[in-house]
């Protein structure tokens, strides 16, 4: 008996971007296992260490792996799976464009980590309450306009995050090599 999903898949069947596979194979457990094996083989070719670690993890069904080790294996494998799925559905260009849009936001995450790990520890709540927000905002705007005018094309959140990321890069460069030209890092 053919299921409704199999009937729908057959009526909209097409070749996938992985040689020898069709859309209908996604609804067939044996072919799906073959497709998974194609992914593991591709991962083995592209990144053998990650491929071997993933195969060991899967063979053990995750048993006996510490949470951090399991997490690392899975996160190390994830970009390769993403590439494989994009190739399978022939959407590599769209995925690449989406990745570019997402990466633009990376400074926001770096800024948030900075606030969580350093800024919050440095200032007590009563110290923050004493700050003159309007004066700080004027100073920040002036700094942005004069020193980081390349961030003016971004919204406030992203521009402040980009400024912070550049300042953190400069701090890191200066602490590693005091002879570094700060302007190069900004």
Image (cartoon, rainbow, N blue to C red):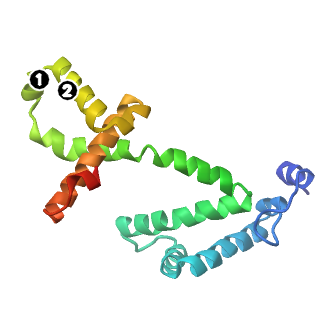
Q: In this rendering, is residue 130 above or below 2?
A: above
Is residue 154 shown to the viewer in this render? no
Judge from the rendering whether residue 63 lies leftward or rightward of residue 66; answer left or right: right
Q: Position of residue 129 (x, y in %)?
A: 11, 22
Judge from the rendering whether residue 180 lies leftward or rightward of residue 65; answer left or right: left
Q: Which comes sooner in the sequence, label 1 or label 2?
A: 1
Q: Residue at x 74, y 58 (%)?
A: 90
Q: In this rendering, is residue 186 above or below 75?
A: above
Q: Residues within 10 Å of mark 2 (few under 14, many from 20)?
A: few
157 vs 121, nearest the viewer: 157
Q: Residue at x 24, y 47 (%)?
A: 167
Secondary structure found at label 1: loop
Is residue 117 shown to the viewer in this render? yes
Marks 1/2: CA distance?
Answer: 13 Å
Judge from the rendering whether residue 9 lies leftward or rightward of residue 75; answer left or right: right
108 vs 117, nearest the viewer: 108
Q: In this rendering, is residue 134 above or below 151?
A: above
| Residue 131 image label | 1
150 vs 73, nearest the viewer: 150
- Find disc 2 in the rendering and name its residue: 139
Q: Position of residue 31 (x, y in %)?
A: 78, 69
Q: Residue at x 64, y 79 (%)?
A: 41
Judge from the rendering whether residue 116 lies leftward or rightward of residue 24; answer left or right: left
């Amino acid at each position: 008996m053919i299921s409704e999903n199999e009937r729908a898949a057959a009526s909209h069947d097409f070749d996938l971007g992985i040689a020898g596979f069709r859309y209908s194979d996604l609804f067939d457990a044996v072919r799906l296992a073959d497709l998974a094996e194609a992914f593991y083989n591709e991962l083995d070719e592209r990144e053998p260490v990650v491929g071997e670690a993933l195969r060991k993890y899967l063979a053990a069904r995750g048993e006996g792996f510490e949470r951090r080790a399991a997490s690392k294996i899975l996160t190390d494998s994830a970009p390769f799976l993403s590439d494989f799925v994009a190739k399978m559905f022939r959407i590599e260009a769209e995925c690449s464009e989406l990745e570019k849009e997402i990466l633009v936001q990376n400074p926001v995450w770096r800024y948030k980590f900075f606030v969580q790990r350093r800024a919050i520890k440095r200032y007590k709540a009563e110290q923050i309450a004493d700050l003159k927000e309007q004066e700080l905002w004027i100073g920040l705007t002036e700094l942005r306009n004069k020193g980081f005018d390349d961030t003016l094309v971004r919204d406030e959140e992203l521009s402040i995050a980009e400024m912070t990321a550049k300042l953190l890069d400069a701090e890191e460069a200066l602490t590693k090599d005091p002879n570094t030209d700060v302007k190069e890092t900004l």
